[in-house]
Amino acid sequence: MTTQHGSYVHNPHSDGALQRWADVLANGAIAPQAGTDLAAAISFGNAQGALEALADGAASLSDDDVKALHYANEMCDLRMYEGLVTLDDHGPILPESVRAAILAMERDGFWEDRPQWVL
Protein backbone atom coordinates (compact mmCIF):
# COMPACT_ATOMS: atom_id res chain seq x y z
CA MET A 1 0.00 0.00 0.00
CA THR A 2 1.37 3.38 -0.93
CA THR A 3 0.90 6.27 1.48
CA GLN A 4 1.50 9.89 0.59
CA HIS A 5 1.53 13.17 2.49
CA GLY A 6 2.71 16.19 0.59
CA SER A 7 5.91 15.19 -1.17
CA TYR A 8 6.53 12.21 1.13
CA VAL A 9 5.67 8.83 -0.40
CA HIS A 10 6.25 5.44 1.23
CA ASN A 11 5.67 2.29 -0.78
CA PRO A 12 6.66 -0.78 1.24
CA HIS A 13 7.48 -3.97 -0.64
CA SER A 14 5.04 -6.13 1.29
CA ASP A 15 3.09 -4.77 4.25
CA GLY A 16 1.99 -8.28 5.24
CA ALA A 17 5.58 -9.49 5.76
CA LEU A 18 6.78 -6.56 7.87
CA GLN A 19 7.38 -6.91 11.60
CA ARG A 20 5.35 -4.59 13.79
CA TRP A 21 7.24 -2.49 16.35
CA ALA A 22 4.78 -3.54 19.05
CA ASP A 23 5.72 -7.18 18.41
CA VAL A 24 9.45 -6.70 19.07
CA LEU A 25 8.84 -5.42 22.61
CA ALA A 26 8.52 -7.77 25.58
CA ASN A 27 8.09 -6.56 29.15
CA GLY A 28 9.27 -3.10 28.09
CA ALA A 29 12.52 -4.38 26.53
CA ILE A 30 13.26 -4.44 22.82
CA ALA A 31 14.57 -7.56 21.07
CA PRO A 32 18.34 -7.14 20.47
CA GLN A 33 18.16 -7.36 16.67
CA ALA A 34 15.23 -4.95 16.56
CA GLY A 35 17.09 -2.47 18.80
CA THR A 36 20.10 -2.59 16.53
CA ASP A 37 17.95 -2.28 13.39
CA LEU A 38 15.92 0.62 14.79
CA ALA A 39 19.04 2.54 15.82
CA ALA A 40 20.58 1.95 12.39
CA ALA A 41 17.45 3.09 10.53
CA ILE A 42 17.09 6.29 12.55
CA SER A 43 20.81 7.05 12.27
CA PHE A 44 20.86 6.29 8.54
CA GLY A 45 18.06 8.75 7.93
CA ASN A 46 19.31 11.21 10.54
CA ALA A 47 15.66 11.19 11.61
CA GLN A 48 15.82 11.80 15.37
CA GLY A 49 14.76 15.44 15.09
CA ALA A 50 11.90 14.65 12.73
CA LEU A 51 10.59 11.88 14.99
CA GLU A 52 10.84 14.17 18.03
CA ALA A 53 8.92 16.87 16.15
CA LEU A 54 6.13 14.41 15.37
CA ALA A 55 6.07 13.25 18.98
CA ASP A 56 5.69 16.89 20.00
CA GLY A 57 2.66 17.24 17.72
CA ALA A 58 4.24 19.18 14.86
CA ALA A 59 1.59 20.09 12.30
CA SER A 60 4.13 20.23 9.47
CA LEU A 61 7.66 19.08 8.76
CA SER A 62 10.57 20.74 6.98
CA ASP A 63 11.83 19.33 3.70
CA ASP A 64 14.89 18.01 5.56
CA ASP A 65 12.66 16.23 8.10
CA VAL A 66 10.60 14.66 5.32
CA LYS A 67 13.77 13.39 3.64
CA ALA A 68 15.11 12.07 6.95
CA LEU A 69 11.90 10.14 7.60
CA HIS A 70 11.91 8.82 4.04
CA TYR A 71 15.41 7.37 4.43
CA ALA A 72 14.71 5.97 7.90
CA ASN A 73 11.50 4.35 6.69
CA GLU A 74 13.27 2.88 3.67
CA MET A 75 15.88 1.33 5.99
CA CYS A 76 13.09 -0.10 8.16
CA ASP A 77 11.47 -1.52 5.04
CA LEU A 78 14.73 -3.11 3.89
CA ARG A 79 15.08 -4.76 7.30
CA MET A 80 11.46 -5.92 7.14
CA TYR A 81 9.92 -3.64 9.78
CA GLU A 82 6.86 -1.46 9.45
CA GLY A 83 7.52 2.24 8.95
CA LEU A 84 8.20 4.65 11.78
CA VAL A 85 5.39 7.04 10.86
CA THR A 86 1.72 6.60 10.05
CA LEU A 87 -0.80 9.02 8.62
CA ASP A 88 -4.08 10.12 10.10
CA ASP A 89 -6.56 12.68 8.79
CA HIS A 90 -4.30 15.53 9.88
CA GLY A 91 -0.96 14.27 8.55
CA PRO A 92 1.97 12.17 9.80
CA ILE A 93 2.03 10.94 13.40
CA LEU A 94 4.39 8.91 15.57
CA PRO A 95 2.58 5.72 16.60
CA GLU A 96 2.69 4.77 20.28
CA SER A 97 4.37 1.45 19.37
CA VAL A 98 7.25 3.33 17.69
CA ARG A 99 7.57 5.70 20.66
CA ALA A 100 7.78 2.68 23.01
CA ALA A 101 10.34 0.97 20.76
CA ILE A 102 12.52 4.11 20.61
CA LEU A 103 12.44 4.55 24.38
CA ALA A 104 13.27 0.86 24.90
CA MET A 105 16.07 1.09 22.31
CA GLU A 106 17.60 4.00 24.20
CA ARG A 107 17.11 2.48 27.66
CA ASP A 108 18.52 -0.91 26.57
CA GLY A 109 21.76 0.63 25.28
CA PHE A 110 21.27 0.60 21.50
CA TRP A 111 21.50 4.42 21.28
CA GLU A 112 24.72 5.00 23.22
CA ASP A 113 26.93 8.01 22.48
CA ARG A 114 24.10 9.79 20.65
CA PRO A 115 21.79 12.62 21.72
CA GLN A 116 19.18 11.69 24.32
CA TRP A 117 15.60 11.34 23.05
CA VAL A 118 12.92 13.88 23.92
CA LEU A 119 9.62 12.11 23.34
Image (tube, rainbow, N blue to C red):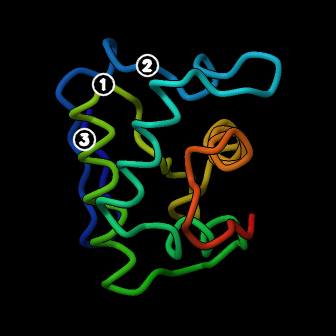
Q: Which residue is mark 2?
A: 19
Quadrant showing the C terminus: bottom right
Location of residue 95 in the rendering, given as x and y in whole percent from the top left corner: 63, 45
Location of residue 103 in the rendering, given as x and y in whole percent from the top left corner: 72, 48
Residue 19's place in the image compared with 21, above or below, is: above
Query: Which dot, 3 or 2, sits closer to the camera?
Result: 2
Location of residue 108 in the rendering, given as x and y in whole percent from the top left corner: 69, 38
In space, the residues marked 1 and 3 are separated at their CA atoms by 16 Å
> Which residue is more in the foreground, 91 or 21?
21
Q: Mark 1, residues whose alpha carbon is within 10 Å: few (<14), some, or many (≥20)?
A: some
Q: Which residue is mark 1?
A: 80
Q: Is residue 5 left or right of residue 116?
A: left
Q: Quadrant of residue 57?
A: bottom right
Q: Secondary structure at mark 2?
A: loop
Residue 36's place in the image compared with 117, above or below, is: above
Q: Which residue is mark 3?
A: 2
Residue lying farthest to the right in this orientation: 27
Residue name at image x 48 percent, y 28 percent: 34
Location of residue 67 in the rendering, given as x and y in whole percent from the top left corner: 27, 72
Q: Is residue 83 left or right of residue 88?
A: left
Q: Inspect the image, locate mark 2, and give the three-letter code of the amino acid beneath it.
A: Gln
Q: Secondary structure at mark 1?
A: loop
Q: Which badge, 1 or 3, comes first in the chain's sequence?
A: 3
Q: Which badge, 3 or 2, comes first in the chain's sequence?
A: 3
Q: Is residue 38 left or right of residue 97?
A: left
In space, the residues marked 3 and 2 are separated at their CA atoms by 17 Å
Q: Quadrant of residue 33?
A: top left
Q: Mark 2, residues whose alpha carbon is within 10 Å: few (<14), some, or many (≥20)?
A: some
Tag 2 near tag 1, CB within 8 Å? yes
Q: Mark 3, residues whose alpha carbon is within 10 Å: few (<14), some, or many (≥20)?
A: few
